[in-house]
Image (spheres, rainbow, N blue to C red):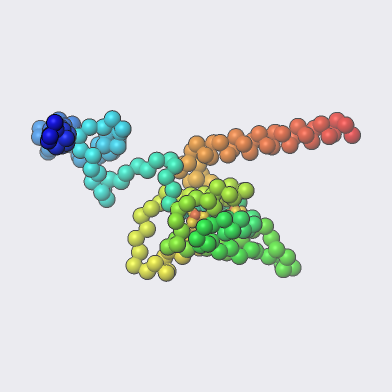
């Protein structure tokens, strides 16, 4: 029927308008309920949430999904002086826009060490593809979710060095719990397999 789609669309808008008063803008709560409270945020973000879908940014911030990624970060276990990164350079090679720069550390005798002395990412160029994290054989580079990076000087603040990139493993585990658990399980399985192989070799000898 001519105009049916228009009426249907307007009825959806009207339904949301009315629901916003039933679920959110309850006039009898206007002076008693804190609208920046976390319960409101959770309700707004729920898949089956009703009423107002807007968030009071920047007082409230949308919770991003676990898979959300923005810029890379470098993971360390105990201290920032001992990152997982071995400076192998694979991430820099696979990075499509070529925005990763790595400098390998050397020991007292000038021999190369499996560690970076410098690691930079040009965040202006990075396109958040996550290839670096996917290809890293040491689970050393992961994707951060911090996406509010306003600056007045992008040359100074968006060329990220190790001070900006290094994060403890606990930070990564909190951001990406499923990936972290899967990686840890794989690591444990690999260590167990190695231990068994060593035991078998010892038995043969
Ligand atoms: S982050 Fe990973 S892939 Fe990149 S240099 Fe370090 S160990 Fe190699
Ligand atoms: S996320 Fe993609 S573009 Fe950004 S540094 Fe990693 S590989 Fe390069």
Q: Quadrant of the N terminus?
A: top left
Q: Position of residue 19 (x, y in %)?
A: 16, 32
Can residue 188 be seen here? The reply is: yes
Q: Residue furthest right?
A: 205
Q: Nearer the viewer, residue 9 or 71?
A: 9
Q: Is 195 situated left or right of 150 in this image?
A: right
What residue sits 46% from the left and 50% below the top? Answer: 144
Residue 123 pos. (x, y %): 45, 61
Q: Quadrant of the C terminus?
A: top right
Q: Give the residue displayed 31% in from the left and 32% down from the top.
A: 47
Give the left or right position of residue 190, taking residue 160 as reference: right
Locate residue 178 relative to residue 44 in the image: left or right: right
Residue 21 placed where, x, y %? 13, 34
Label tally: 0
Question: Residue 81: image x %, image y %?
Answer: 59, 57
Quadrant of ligand 1 in image? bottom right
- In the image, residue 162 above or below residue 174: below
Name which residue lies at 84% across and 34% down.
202
**Can the viewer see residue 167?**
no
Which image quarter: residue 62?
top left
Q: Residue 93's image quarter?
A: bottom right
- Taking the view exactly as shown, the residue that stands out farthest to the front is 1
Task: Write down the quadrant of residue 193 in the picture.
Answer: top right
Residue beneath the point at 23% across and 43% down: 54
- Horizontally, residue 186 falls left or right of residue 95, namely right
Residue 77 vertical position relative to residue 185 in the rendered view, above or below = below
């Amino acid at each position: 029927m001519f105009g049916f789609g228009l009426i249907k669309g307007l009825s959806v808008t009207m339904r949301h308008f009315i629901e916003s008063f039933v679920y959110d803008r309850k006039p009898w709560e206007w002076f008693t309920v804190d609208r920046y409270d976390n319960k409101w945020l959770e309700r707004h973000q729920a898949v089956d949430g009703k009423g107002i879908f807007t968030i009071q940014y920047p007082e409230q911030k949308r919770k991003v999904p676990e898979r959300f990624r923005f810029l890379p970060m470098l993971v360390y276990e105990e201290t920032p002086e001992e990152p997982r990164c071995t400076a192998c350079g694979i991430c820099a090679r696979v990075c499509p826009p070529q925005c990763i720069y790595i400098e390998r550390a050397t020991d007292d005798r000038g021999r190369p060490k499996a560690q970076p002395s410098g690691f930079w990412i040009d965040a202006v160029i990075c396109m958040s593809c996550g290839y670096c994290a996917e290809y890293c054989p040491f689970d050393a580079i992961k994707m951060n979710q911090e996406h509010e990076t306003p600056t007045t000087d992008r040359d100074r603040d968006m060329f990220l060095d190790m001070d900006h990139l290094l994060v403890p493993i606990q930070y990564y585990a909190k951001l990406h719990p499923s990936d972290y658990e899967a990686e840890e399980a794989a690591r444990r399985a690999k260590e167990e397999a190695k231990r068994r192989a060593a035991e078998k070799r010892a038995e043969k000898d």
